[in-house]
Image: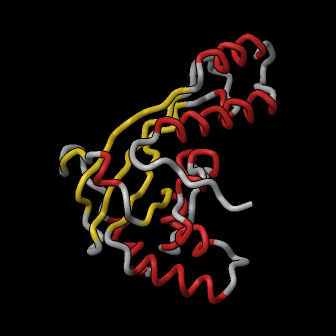
Amino acid sequence: MTARAQQIEKNVPAPGAVHDCKPEDLAGGIAMTQRTLLQLAKIPIGDEPEHADWTNPTALDSPASRVLVDPNADPDAIKSAAADWLLAPFYVVYRVDIANAPMALGIKDLKRGTLGARVIRYDRSAHPTCVVVFSVQNDKDVSDLAIKKSDRALIDARIVNALREDLTQQYLLSVPGPKPVPAAP
């Protein structure tokens, strides 16, 4: 499983290298965020905003992917999830390529935050088969309010968190393909 995850991570398609996915191309596989893929591949996760928790919401991870990266998961659940993962017909990776959201990063650059992302489908051999390129922005009202309230030299932590939460929500609402599955409580 680790070897396959490493292959998926290495096989990121160049722009135009694979065709555009249709919505039905993304349903039925094992889904994961880029952060989860790195964990499965046992590749260290950098501190870039593209790999942060808020740009890689766990709601995008399939249940099997969630179990496999949970350090407290039951051993039997891990075996079952690993079998599901290895026998999956294909894999879907949600990859944030650009996090142009300075205020959500605590930088006083008063503009609306944007995430540039791709949804990439991989076959069982870890080869990319199709991709959807998309972007999301902070809600205009949330962004305008944050800009209005940012009257100090540093961005207030509450504003940073509100903008991150909003970008996460906008991402989850806009992501192409099947709707995310909420994590179990």
Front residue of 114/61: it is 61
Q: What colour scheme governs how the chains and residues are painted in the rendered image of this protein?
A: secondary structure
- 79 above or below 156? below
Residue 32, position as x, y percentages in the image: 48, 60
- 52 above or below 107? below
Task: Classify residue 103 as left or right of residue 42.
Answer: right
Q: What residue lies at 52% left-to-right and 63% top-to-bottom?
A: 62
* Picture quadrant of residue 162: top right
- 89 above or below 15? below
Please identify the quadrant where the N terminus is shown: bottom left
Residue 145, position as x, y percentages in the image: 72, 14
Front residue of 88/4: it is 88
Residue 24, position as x, y percentages in the image: 30, 51
Please identify the quadrant where the C terminus is shown: bottom right
Q: What residue lies at 57% left-to-right and 62% top-to-bottom?
A: 45
* Picture quadrant of residue 10: bottom left
Q: What residue lies at 30% left-to-right and 70% top-to-bottom?
A: 126
Residue 67, position as x, y percentages in the image: 61, 73
Q: What residue lies at 53% left-to-right and 47% top-to-bottom?
A: 50
Q: How many marks?
A: 0
Task: Classify residue 46 as left or right of residue 130.
Answer: right
